[in-house]
Image (tube, helix red, strand yellow):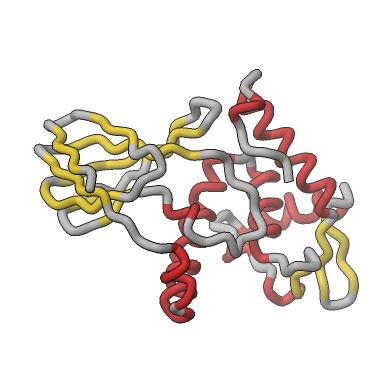
Amino acid sequence: MLKVDLSSNEKYYLDGRFFLITKGKVITKDILASGKIISNENCLREGELVGNFFNISSNFNVNLPEIDVEVEALEETTLEEFKFSKKDILKNTVFEKMLSQLIKKSIIKFLYQLYDSKGYILAILKLYANSDNEIPKKEISYENFNISKSQFYLIYSKLKKENYIIEEKNLVKLNIEKINEYLNHLVLDECSGKEEECFQKK
């Protein structure tokens, strides 16, 4: 089992692994292939796990870029590699559902920083859509998007006019090809010539 000792302010890339903090505390940063850094404001302490939890569940209809997690020690810190089986987690239905809900909340915060307002709403709509790319109208509310009511409905009306979404009776249907094209375009702009390093188009 890998053990890592860090001095205060020392940084360490997790390289896809999970670690248990057995001493000290850290803050984490998500490093995208484009070089963009998304900082996490909460510090993690002894007894907590660090890693890219987005990789645990594949139940989300949204593309995420490749992410490396960097930790920075806020004091003398010890990390011990923590290995677990994704298969074992998925066997426990209750635990998997709880974990999926927590991951979904994290994804929503992550998408807010990754995309512009239009892309953010499109990505969240994808997140809530079923396998037929449809969402019941009653499930769509500005409160699910963590933005103001006026901003949400202004962008939502534009998405209808531009045919990203189509309302039919009680359903909202996503024009998934057009949505993916827009989201992928945003990511390629963010990559600035590093397309091969960024996540694959769906």
Q: Quadrant of residue 150?
A: bottom right
Give the side of residue 197 with respect to residue 16, left or right.
right
Q: Position of residue 138 (x, y in %)?
A: 72, 76
Q: Nearer the viewer, residue 155 or 4?
A: 4
Which residue is located at x 43 percent, y 54 percent? 53
Q: How many numbered markers are drawn? A: 0
- The answer to whether 159 is drawn above or below residue 66 in the figure is below
Q: Residue at x 59, y 59 (%)?
A: 145
Answer yes or no: is residue 150 visible.
no
Left or right of 130? Residue 169 is: right
Q: Position of residue 16 (x, y in %)?
A: 41, 43
Quarter where residue 182 is shown:
top right
> Measured from the top left, where is residue 116 in percent x and y?
63, 39
Q: Residue lying farthest front?
A: 1
Q: Is residue 13 rendered to the left or right of residue 166? A: left
User: In the figure, 73 relative to 83: above or below?
Assistant: above
- Residue found at the far top of this picture: 193
As rendered, which of 188 and 150 lies closer to the eye? Answer: 188
Q: In the figure, is residue 53 to the left or right of 22?
A: right
Write the residue at 14% across / 52% down: 22
Q: Nearer the viewer, residue 17 or 198?
A: 17
* Residue at the farthest bottom position: 94
Q: Position of residue 58 (x, y in %)?
A: 58, 60
Give the residue at x 86% y 66%. 167
**The one of 66 and 129 positioned closer to us in this rendering:** 66
Residue 146 visible in the snapshot: yes
